[in-house]
Image (spheres, rainbow, N blue to C red):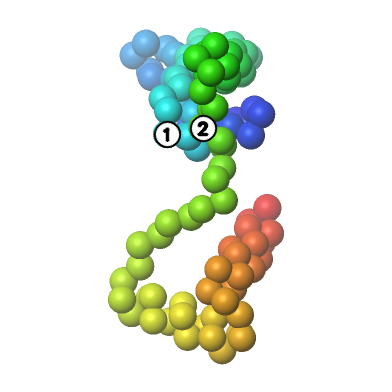
Amino acid sequence: MMQYKGYLSRVEFDDEANLFHGEVVNIRDVVTFQGATVDELHRAFEASVDDYLAFCAERGEAPDPPFSGRLTIRLSPEQHRKVILAATRAGKPLDQWTAEVLDHATQLGA
C-alpha cells in the first residue's frame, strides 16, 4: 500500500496487460492510476493525487479528506453486547474504549 499526502492506494497487477493498476482507497471520489514499473506506479500515484487536489481547487470544492475520524462498523447483536459490556467494565465511553483497543491492536501489528 502506498501513501502520499495522507491518501492511501490499493494496487493490483494485470498480468495480461503487464501493468500495475491502482486506486486511492480512503476517499469517496474515484482516483486511479497505472504504471508498467514500480517507479512509474509511484510517480503516477503522486501525479493522480496532485491532479485530484488541483481539480478540486479549480472547481472551488474541498477535496475528500483522507480520513474523517469516523469509523462505522457492523457487528452482530452478540458482538455489540460484548463490546458495550467491555467498555462499561473499563469505565470508559464506547468511543474512547474502542479507540484505545484499536490503537493497541495497530501497535502490535506495526
| In this view, 45 is above or below 96 | above
Q: Which residue is drawn at 34% across and 14% down?
A: 16
Instruction: Determine contact: label 1, label 2, CB under 8 Å.
Output: yes
Q: Name the residue under label 2.
A: 64
Locate residue 89: give its quadrant.
Answer: bottom right
Report which quarter residue 46 is drawn in: top right
Residue at point 46% right, 80% down?
A: 84
Instruction: Look at label 2 and name its amino acid.
Output: Asp
User: Which mark, by number, is residue 28?
Assistant: 1
Q: Measuring from the top left, give residue 32's x and y in whole percent.
A: 45, 20
Q: How far apart are marks 1 and 2 (CA)?
A: 7 Å
Residue at 47% x, 85% y is 85
* Image position of 90 with respect to 57: above or below: below
**Where residue 18 sits: x, y (%)?**
42, 12
As drawn, is 95 to the left or to the right of 14?
A: right
Q: Is 53 above or below relative to 10?
A: above
Is residue 12 visible in the rendered image? The answer is: no
Point out the image quarter for the N terminus: top right
